[in-house]
Image (cartoon, grey):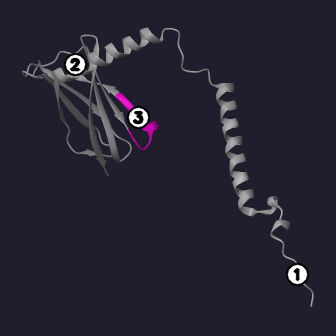
Amino acid sequence: MSEVNINPNSHSWYKSPLLLGWLFLVLAAMAGTIFMVIQANSGFPGLVVDDFYERGQDYEENIQKKLDNNNKWNTIFDIDEIFLNQSTTIKIVFVDSSGAPATPDEVTLFAYRPANSTKDFNVPMALIVKEGMAKKGAYQATMSFDAKGKWDLLASMKINGVEVNYAQSIFVKD
């Protein structure tokens, strides 16, 4: 009978599948990192602007004005059932904390479709006039929705040069 000589030292290191797998993973990670660094440096101009400090201060002031102004006003949405492709009137009343009506410069109603942004639209809102007299703080817009499901409404009121936004979710039925 012939004798088989099994020597543990005769096995080459580069034939190990475990070692080759780890080596492949390390090289793939390095290649991906190098690719991402090259992509980042070649095409993106960056977010740095020359007047970053002034822009940051302006942004903070505007956000604080909006937050302060949002807390001054209460909004009441008056929305009936909404059906697909049927005209509906959406009413919104803006009053302050003491119940006095708002007198905004401009009011716009935005309709956002979370599932499909191509359906988004906006309409200006008009002051509600009944029997020749304007109902203070009450605005309305007539709109029609061409897709059923969830929509988000955003009433944007510009008052004293500051924009104030109020949101409401609605559901459009078949």
As drawn, 49 above or below 15: above
| Image position, residue 173 (x, y; %) | 29, 50
Residue on which disc 2 sits: 68
What amino acid type should be assigned to the residue bearing mark 2? Answer: Asp
15 or 69: nearer the eye?
15
Residue on which disc 1 sits: 4
Q: What element carries label 1?
A: loop
| Image position, residue 174 (x, y; %) | 32, 52
Residue on which disc 3 sits: 120
Residue count near mark 2 (Cα–Cα under 10 Å), binned few <14, some 14–19, many ≥20: few
Rendering quarter of residue 116: top left
Q: Rounded to the nearest whole Å, what is the CA distance between mark 2 and mark 1?
A: 88 Å
Q: What element carries label 2?
A: helix
What amino acid type should be assigned to the residue bearing mark 3? Answer: Asp
Sooner in the amino-acid sequence: mark 2 or mark 1: 1
Sooner in the amino-acid sequence: mark 3 or mark 1: 1
Rendering quarter of residue 92: top left
Sooner in the amino-acid sequence: mark 3 or mark 2: 2
| Image position, residue 50 (x, y; %) | 53, 9
